[in-house]
Each structure stands twice: as structure tokens, then as C-alpha cells.
Image: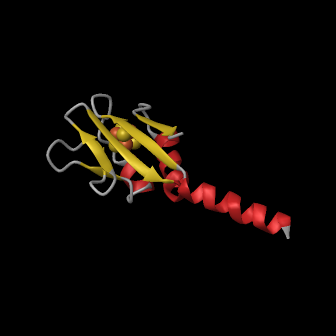
Amino acid sequence: MYQENGRATARRHATMTQYRVIVDRDACIGCGVAAELCNEVFMLNPGDGKNQVAPKYEVEHSDSISVGIIPGELYECTLSAVQSCPVEAIRLEKIA
Ligand code: SF4
């Protein structure tokens, strides 16, 4: 019984965890891989063709940077974009 409760608590914490994702738009070469792998979180900006966090999650935007706050359930697909970016332009940080 205790173990079941423990697992349920762990699951709740995992889904409540949030992450900050930071796109270095100066470094981005607009290859489109981020949006291809994780289109819930990333999109190519129609103006300059560079990656940005989708408006639903974006909290800061400029020509140089795009910052978003994403829920834990989007961590895996966001991480796949981080790991696949050819110029390492995306950072992912857990929010304490
Ligand atoms: S994978 Fe990297 S270089 Fe390609 S669009 Fe995304 S941020 Fe830009």
C-alpha cells in the first residue's frame, strides 16, 4: 500500500515538474530539425526562418533569443531536439 502511494506521488511530481528551454537564435541556422522532432515546443519563425519556442509556451522573445517554460510531459521530445541540434543552440534546464 505504501509503495503504491509512493509511486503515485512520484508520478505526480514528474508531471508537475517544469523546464526552461532557451533557444539561441543567433546560433540557430534554421535547419528545422527542432520543430520536426518536437513540433509542440518548437517552430520556425515565419519572419526570419529561425527556431523559436511555440507561442503557447514562450515567455521571452527577441531576434537573439527565445525562452519558454514547458511541462514535464514535453521533456523527452524537447531533449531529443536539444541533442539533435547541429549547432547546440538549445538549452534545457529544470526549474527547481
Ligand atoms: S535544430 Fe538547432 S539549428 Fe536547427 S532549427 Fe533547431 S535550433 Fe535551429
Q: Residue furthest left?
A: 47
- Residue positioned 35% across, 37% down in the render: 23
Q: Nearer the viewer, residue 15 or 54?
A: 15
Rendering quadrant holding ligand 1: top left
Residue 2: image quadrant is bottom right
Q: Nearer the viewer, residue 40 or 36?
A: 40
**In what quadrant of the picture does the C terminus appear?**
top right
Please count the marks in the image: 0
Residue 16 in the image: above or below residue 90: below
- Residue positioned 17% across, 50% down in the render: 46
Residue 81: where, in percent of width, then height? 47, 46
Answer with left or right where residue 10 lies relative to residue 3: left
Q: Residue furthest bottom?
A: 1
Q: Nearer the viewer, residue 20 or 76?
A: 20
- Residue positioned 44% across, 31% down in the render: 88
Q: Nearer the viewer, residue 10 or 79?
A: 10
Answer with left or right where residue 85 lies relative to residue 8: left
Residue 33: where, in percent of width, then height? 40, 48
Residue 31 in the image: above or below residue 37: above
Answer with left or right where residue 87 lies relative to residue 76: left
Residue 58 in the image: above or below residue 87: below
- Residue positioned 85% across, 71% down in the render: 1
Residue 52: where, in percent of width, then height? 29, 45
Residue 82: where, in percent of width, then height? 48, 41
Coloring basis for residues? secondary structure
